[in-house]
Image (tube, grey):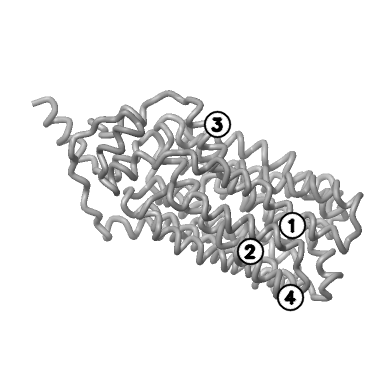
Amino acid sequence: MHNPLGEFENRRLNLFHIKTTLIAGAGQVVDGYDLTAASLVLASMEVYFGNSLLQLSTVLFASIILGNILGAIIFGYLAKHGRKKFYGIDAMLMIFGALFQAFATSAYEIAILRFLLGLGIGADYVLSPLINAEYANIKDRGKLMAISGGFMWNFGALLSAIVTLYLAQIFPQSTLWRVVLALGSVPAIAVVVFRRKFPETPHYLLYVKKDLNELKEKYGLTVDNINISKIVLKAVLPVLFIASLTWYLYDISAYSSVFFGPNVIAERIGVNGVLFELIILAIFSVPWNFTSSLLADRLGRKKLQAIGFIGMGVFTLLFAFLIGKVDILTTLIIYGMSSIFNSLGPGTIVGFWGVELFPAEIRGITQGITVVSGRMGVLTTTFLFPIILQNYGIVTTMILLGILGIVASIITLRLPEPKGKSLSEVSVGKESMKQTSADKNS
């Protein structure tokens, strides 16, 4: 089977792949850092602004998530006009939104700034995995996307816990939250500096812009005119729906822990909130994100996500039934096991589907739709989780989350497996690739 970009996609892992992966991942560091940091300094902000937990969580999280949704929609559409063109604007929004939180004097100002921050992060959720995948080789694409996605997100979250724990020894509570939140701008600055140096992706140049001269100039690739497969909505929509649904269900579960783990869950089991988050991330999350990256191109995305979801569900249910009945260490380990399966599976993989399963022409839009679905899951958590907690307690809440994990595992099995497949296959189509190969041999 002939692959029009075979010479590029079959290259061995090299420095270009590593650089593009790290730069793509820097945006995820910002998101992981900021969302986790906000939960860690929630108590400090509550004292300063005088709001209840429910009101403040709505300001902090709903504003940034609404920004995510709009950013994903806008930049998902704009991606068809160029990947590289917008691969710095998202970071500028993140810098502005994160940095100026330090000067906010009201909850409304915080909401506006976090909306702008969210706008940049939502754009980055679309652009970073899309661009990183289109730069990657076939053999290591899963590994590279996993490192720039789930691994870097949790690295950012871990960084926020370390920074908060350290700065809490230096600054009073009234200043702590300002410094911690503003520092989220630092990795975004690195993004702006380095992203503009990379060329437009070869997939965009060939399949969307159709500029064979620029493709040859930037990558040294000579490609004949090709027939691009017609996009059939009947074939695309069911897969897009399932991919979006898995991200929606994942974010309901995952962000329940992100938003309220350091406050509600840690308090229930008698552990300091920041220390709790540090332990979970350093021992149970980040190492297993990296493990997932090593397995993504071996076991496949579908297997890892299905195993991850089922593990999350089972251990969340176990946590619900045993909380308050066993010692702190056992409770922490059980909760940590749920985090391990989270990181091994959907926490790393769930952002792949909108990119890997769809043609280059609509890849920005499909990724944007899956991102929006995930953000809707976060909004569901933001508004419902505190209410369910207050009315039904932590046990009932964790049981519901455990059931969702098991359901999501079953749904995942309906997705196609992109492991070892060229992104060209969904852009040109198998039959066109076969025909091109036959034409070359005749």
- Give the CA distance from mark 1 to mark 4: 19 Å
User: Left or right: 45 with respect to 207?
Assistant: right
SS for dot 3:
helix
Front residue of this view, candidates 319 and 139: 139
**How far from the left and from the top, in percent, is residue 218?**
35, 34
Which label number is shown at residue 222? none
- Give the CA distance from mark 3 to mark 1: 32 Å
Mark 4 crowd level (few <14, some 14–19, many ≥20, 10 Å Cα): few
Name the residue located 32 percent from the left edge and 49 percent from the top edge: 359
- Give the CA distance from mark 2 to mark 1: 31 Å
Which label number is shown at residue 400? 2
Label 4 is placed on what type of residue?
Gln
Q: Earlier in the sequence, mark 3 or mark 2?
A: 3
Observer-side mark, 1 or 4, equals: 1
**How far from the left and from the top, in percent, is residue 267?**
84, 59
What residue is disc 3 on? Answer: 294
Q: Earlier in the sequence, mark 4 or mark 3?
A: 4
What residue is disc 1 on? Answer: 181
Label 2 is placed on what type of residue?
Leu
What residue is disc 4 on? Answer: 55
Position of 391 relative to 219 (above/below): below
